[in-house]
Amino acid sequence: MATTKLFPITATERKAINYIADGSKTDNGRLISTFCCSSDPAQASRDFASVRACGTGKNKILSQHFIQSFKPGEITPERALEVGEELCEKFLKGQYQYYLAVHVDKAHVHLHVIFNNCNMYDYKTFETHEDQGSKKERAWKKLFDLSDEICKRHHLSVIQHPELSKGKKRWEWMLDQQGLSWKTKLKKAIDQVVMNSEDFEDFLAKCADYGVLVEYNPDHKIDLKFMLAEQKERNPRARFTRARTLGGYYETETIKKRIAQFVGGMSYTPRARVRAVEQTPQNKFVQDAIDRGNMKIASIAKNIIAQYGIEPDNLEPEIQKLFSQREALYEEIQVLKEKVKDLKGLLKTLTAYKKLKPIHDELESLKGRKRKKYQDEHFDELRDYYSAEQELDSWFDNKKYESESKVKEVLAHYQKMLTQKEAEHDAVHAKFVELRRAQSDIDAYLRQYAPQTQQDEQQYQQEQSRSQRKKKKDVLE
């Protein structure tokens, strides 16, 4: 489903444009569109700078960058380019230069748009015109709403009820996948309390039993707050988290509704039914193969039943099921490979940032000519530092960067998951191949002995009837 992210660029604008214009990601530049700037990344950055030069020059933000991602297999790259151009036209209103690129290097099609932070008409900043006022009037909200509106018009899926979830930085999202984020732990603990409560008052009373501290004040606008008890133990100065911060499912009225649903569901007790189990007779296909004297095919069918518990008549549905499982596992493996790749890149960025930070700190301690001289001498290192800082800001909140050891721990977890999924995929694939081979043998047998004409069919049925009568006669004797 279509998702959108918006964030500012304060340094390395040229490098950012060069990244999104990469020919290996944009089908050799075919999936690029620009407005009032060159398609060459270096020149586009200079075009942006020439417009900014007409402004006050006081704003540190050079340009804005947003990403629109689509559900895998839902849209073609060419159509994504059309959707991106329509979104830019409605969002930027023809007042800002932009560089749009559709990427096809991942499992899902997504597009990047970098647009100048300075308006071409009055040279004021994007924040001045578009990012003021209440939450509903902020730029990111307008972008999300426009994206959903355009995607619905193009019959593309969008996130339903986005108000029930909160935006996350990439690192927190990675931890959520493992269940290591403190927010995830808090949500799971609250979910347990909800499932075991009779009503809201009982919920408040039972929170402590599940390691959740709660503050409830119905007279206050922010009426409900939570905290894990272990958080308080580790940091006595830790603050409570607003229920709204955890998402709509954890606000007062929603919790009351969830409890009512659980209580209503638990009150129903279905009647037990006793069913007689009959012993399964010899499989008809196997018996038929034995009757015809084809012991090889009977042996294949028996082996399938013994090894997998599958009747030969059910081979085709089972093979289709295995095919679906194999494809689903393949998709999971590709997603895990992307996560492992991203985490390796994060680890490399953290290492570079740690190495280059002393150079930046030294620059910040200098003034005047000494600062300018030091900046010129260490231009390349400072450029790499700002690039690493920008990348880390896309992962973490408020420059609270995680340690390298923690990233290595999470990376090891995903590598282990990847290994397990690959082993599971190999096992399903092996079973799929074996059953396909067995099915091929059985089909070859059936083609060999299948009646070719209506007369052959009648003769075959007569032979079967005589065989059955003979068996009954032998039994009676």
Image: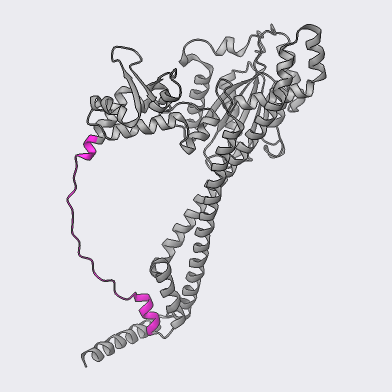
Q: Position of residue 26 (x, y in %)?
A: 67, 37
Rendered position, 309 above or below 241: below
**Magenta stretch containing residue 145, yes or no?**
no
**Which image quadrant for residue 303?**
bottom left
Rendered position, 344 above or below 273: above
Front one among 324 and 383: 383
Q: Position of residue 159 (x, y in %)?
A: 45, 32
Q: Position of residue 171 (x, y in %)?
A: 55, 31
* Picture quarter with the C terminus: bottom left
* Residue depicted at 47% across the width and 78% down the height: 445
* Residue depicted at 49% across the width and 10% down the height: 133
Q: Is residue 353 left or right of residue 304?
A: right
Write down the region rendered in magenta.
263-291
Q: Is residue 455 left or right of residue 119?
A: left
Front one among 357 and 438: 357
* Residue depicted at 36% across the width and 79% down the height: 287
Q: How many marks?
A: 0
Q: Position of residue 64 (x, y in %)?
A: 62, 20
